[in-house]
Amino acid sequence: MRRLYPLISFALLVACAPPPEREITVAMTEYAFVPATIEVAAGERVRLVIRNTGRLEHDFATDQRGVALGITHVHLAPGASQSIDWTAPAEATEVAIRCTIVGHEALGMVGRLVVRARAP
Ligand SMILES: [Cu+2]
């Protein structure tokens, strides 16, 4: 039962979340994320639309910081897509992105998500 609590609170969070301010499409192909750098403003609500435009399976996985910030791991078959509604943290930060399919990271399938401080 305890394992359900994070799921329930996440569902409530999603249900109550305001709509995204901006949609950002990230394509995954052999062997790159396009764009490789995703830039968002601190506190910005975005919809990340992850698309696998390649011919192999790929995934969108962040480092521990990204996981802590609530970015879910997305694994996609060729031609599939999935969107993540996400609110950037209030502070500037940077999250590393990689494809965890064996060999893909070594072939350059890495990216980063940069959260920029808002201009005062
Ligand atoms: Cu890949």
Image (spheres, grey):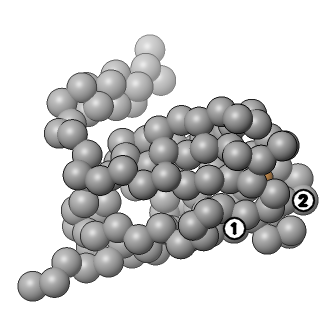
Can you say whether 75 is above or below 107 in the image? above
Instruction: Residue at 59% x, 36% y: name it.
Output: 81
Q: On the picture, is 108 further left or further right than 4?
A: right
**Picture coordinates of residue 112 (x, y %)?**
55, 70
**Picture coordinates of residue 11 (x, y %)?**
33, 25
Residue under label 1 = 110
Instruction: Residue at 54% x, 35% y: name it.
Output: 82
Instruction: Residue at 90% x, 59% y: name it.
Output: 103
Instruction: Residue at 29% x, 53% y: name it.
Output: 22
Q: Amino acid at mark 2?
A: Gly
Residue 103: image tag: 2
Helix, strand or loop at mark 2: loop
Q: On the picture, is 73 further left or further right than 108?
A: left
The one of 115 and 37 positioned closer to us in this rendering = 37
Q: On the picture, is 109 further left or further right than 82?
A: right
Q: Residue furthest left?
A: 120
Q: Amino acid at mark 1?
A: Val
- Residue 100 appearing in the image: no
Q: CA distance from mark 2 to mark 1?
A: 11 Å
**In the rendered structure, which disc, 2 or 1, sits on the residue that comes first in sequence?**
2
Can you say whether 46 is above or below 94 in the image? above
Q: Residues within 10 Å of mark 2 (few under 14, many from 20)?
A: few
Q: Are marks 2 and 1 in contact (CB under 8 Å)?
A: no
- Residue 111 appearing in the image: yes
